[in-house]
Amino acid sequence: MATRVLASKLRNTGRLWGAGEEAAGLRQSHALAVADERFQRYNSPVPSTVDHTAVLGRPETKVTTLANGLRVASESDLSAATATVGVWIDAGSRFETASTNGTAHFLEHMIFKGTKRRSVRQLEEEVENMGGHLNAYTSREQTTYYAKVMKKDLPVAVDILADILQNSRFDEDRITRERQVILREMEEVEGQVEEVMFDHLHATAFQHSSLGRSILGPAANIRSITKANLQDYITTHYTAPRMVIAAAGAVQHEDLVSLAEKSFQSLSTNPTTAGQLVQQEPAVFTGSEVRIQDDDQTLTHLAVALKGAAWTDPDSIALMVMQTMLGAWNKNAVVGKHAGSEMAQKIGANNLAESVMAFNTNYADAGLFGVYAVAKPDTLDDLSYCIMHEMTSLIYRAAPDDVARACNQLKSYLLLHMDGTSAVAEDIGRQILTYGRRLPLAELFARIDAVDVDTVKRVGTRFIADQEVAIAAIGPAQNLPDYNWFRRHTYWNRY
């Protein structure tokens, strides 16, 4: 077919072929067909920066490591009018003790409450006057402070970030005031059932482990955290080797490196890494369940999870594809019951849930892979069967068309997610902390395309077949099957 198409194109150029030309054309066609087959079988045979730039049009990510161990990374888009710059830190709630749990999040609040150079008012007015956006977030393994500003204000943004991370005052009256803010925030989070669900899921899945602790921490800790706790956390964890300055948009890498060298001179060079702390207290997955019976609610929230892969696990990409195969569905979604996912089709056609979503959460040495659903109490039995049946189907009867569709959907999602300088900067910072480098999209896409039916079955056998399960449920859960039922449905008794 490729030969006939090529010959047709060449004949339409307006001249006749000689015998030698025709033979050369056929050889070229054969070479193209072989190259195409090789690409389909092995993805890009030689992944490189050239493939990355030419195929997907992404600028190069430049990385420089300063003398103190601080890494500076950027992706330039000189056509952009704005830039996002931030500091990604290998520090989160996982690196706290039981008595100091909540310190990382408390520190995120306090970091904007005045420095030795800027009062709270000066800091807020400076950001407002340049029309910028300054924000932060804390997760279980990372903390991020970032700013989005106009191109001309990038040096000011870097100076502000350096100032708040190195010179924060932590006045006692501000600490007292912020306690009440965080306690009110905790009350608001308690009303967000999905947030509470995943906190309980982590707590039961990673019992007696730092990964099982919540990000906000218990209320008792919030009331007792002191200035000394905050300063000790900064000294221990906010060190140059555990930080990445990442920027995207209207930024020149050399200028960013110069700004970082000038501004971040007071950081600790403590060589203790997050990896060493993880080795001291690894995540241990425990098959278990937690059920919070609440008959006042009209819907039951349910999460079923198995131990997933770490960020650097070779099978982490395959689990991302499998998550996409399971898919997500919402009764109000446009796609409705005609989604590509079999689980979504069955749940939609039989009205088994209000919404359902597969999830795949990665950490440094573990992960959670499973399904989260919201349903009426009288459908829990059938819903549980559908979820477990579709999860175990990945082991025994994954279809090539489903795998191919999931790979395409995953690649599309990754590209759509990279829309905007903030998303790109976040991607750079997170990947350098987790992988030690930024994966080019061409390489990531090649890894996704390498996932086939055999890979899905092998990875399903590793992570799903006859493995322990963690379950969390909130609401009227009388009709939810017991733990042993879920455990038995992680495999099929067939050959």
Image (cartoon, helix red, strand yellow):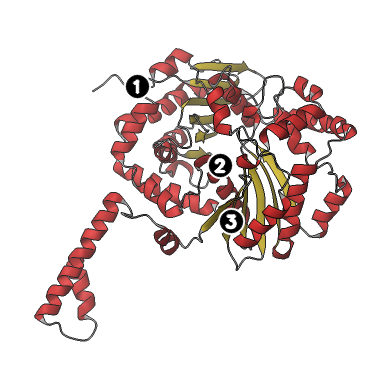
Residues packed near mark 3 inside 10 Å, few (<14), some (14 to 19) or many (20 plus):
many
Tell me residue 125's x, y (percent): 85, 53
Q: Earlier in the sequence, mark 3 or mark 1?
A: 3
In front of the other: 265 or 122: 265
**Cα gap from disc 2 to disc 1, whole angstroms:** 36 Å
Extreme residue toward the front, this view: 67
Left or right of 126 in this view: 11: left
Please give the name of the residue rendered at 40% of the width and 44% of the height, measured from the top-left corner: 406
Q: Residue at x 87, y 35 (%)?
A: 171
Extreme residue in the right direction: 173
**Which label sits on residue 74?**
3
What residue did someone put label 2 on?
Answer: 433
Cα distance in 3D space between marks 3 and 1: 46 Å
Say what amino acid the circle numbered 2 marks: Leu
Q: Position of residue 424 (x, y in %)?
A: 57, 53
Residue receiving disc 1: 491
Q: Quadrant of residue 476?
A: top right
Viewer-side label of 2, 1: 2
